[in-house]
Amino acid sequence: MIPLLLVALSLPDIDGTARRFFEPGGLTALFFVTHDCPVANYYAPEIRRICDDYRAKGLSCALVYVDPALTPAAVHTHAADYRHGDYPKLIDREHRLVKLAGATTTPEVALLGKDGKLVYRGRIDDFYVTWGKARRAVSDATLRRALDAHLAGQPVAVKTTKAVGCFIGDLR
C-alpha cells in the first residue's frame, strides 16, 4: 500500500462544512477535477455511477476541484451542469490534497482504504488512450477493479496508473 496520512486533515466543502477524509473502517474516493477540463467533464456520469454503485458497500466520495480561483457558486453551477451527485465538493486552494495524494492530472482518483492508506491512485478507467484519443469502449474499469479487490479483502493488483486528462498546474 502507498502510505498517505490524511487522519488529521480536514478541509471545508463549498457549503462550509468541515470534511475529514478518513474515518476508521471507511473507504473514500477523492476525484480530482476542474471545471474546464473536457476529459474530467466527460467522466462526470461515471464518477456519479461509481459513487452510487459503491455507496451501499461503504464508499464515500468527494470531488476535489484543483483550481484555487474557483468560487463556491461556480462549483455549484458546474456540479449541477454535469449532474454530479450529492457527494461533497471541495476547492483545494492550497493543493494540500493534490500534494498528499500525488495527483497530477484531472480527472484522477485517490482511493483511501479502510486503514486510511492510499490503496490506488490514477485513472478511472482506460477509455482515453492519450489526450484526444479514446477507445471505442472501456476495456479496463481500473477504479472499479481496485474497489472490488479492496472490498473483498484482496490486495489491489495495480496500485497506480497514469491518468489522461488536464495537467494540474503548480500554484506558483
Image (spheres, grey):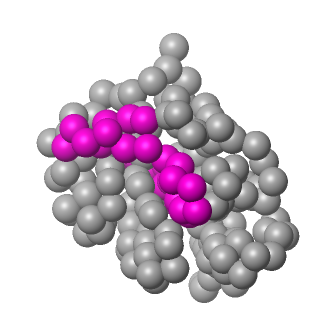
Q: Residue at x 69, y 50 (%)?
A: 117
Q: Give the residues in magenta.
A: 10-39
Taking 18 as reference, is 58 left or right? right
Residue 25 in the image: above or below residue 77: below
Residue 69 placement: quadrant: top left
Whether residue 135 is visible, yes or no, is no
Asked if residue 160 is among those painted magenta in the image, a careful observer would answer no
Instruction: Provide residue 110's location: percent of width, then percent of height.
Output: 60, 53
Asked if residue 17 is among those painted magenta in the image, a careful observer would answer yes
Q: Residue at x 22, y 38 (%)?
A: 16
Residue 52 in the image: above or below residue 169: below
> In front here: 25 or 77?
25
The extreme top residue here reads 172
Q: Which residue is drawn at 70% across and 58% down?
A: 120
Instruction: Provide residue 61's location: percent of width, then percent of height.
Output: 44, 61
> In front here: 65 or 155?
155
Instruction: Provide residue 131's location: percent of width, then percent of height.
Output: 61, 56
Residue 70 placement: quadrant: top left
> In front here: 120 or 65?
120
Whether residue 5 is visible, yes or no, is yes
The extreme front residue here reads 24
Q: Residue at x 78, y 48 (%)?
A: 2
Taking 41 as reference, is 6 left or right? right
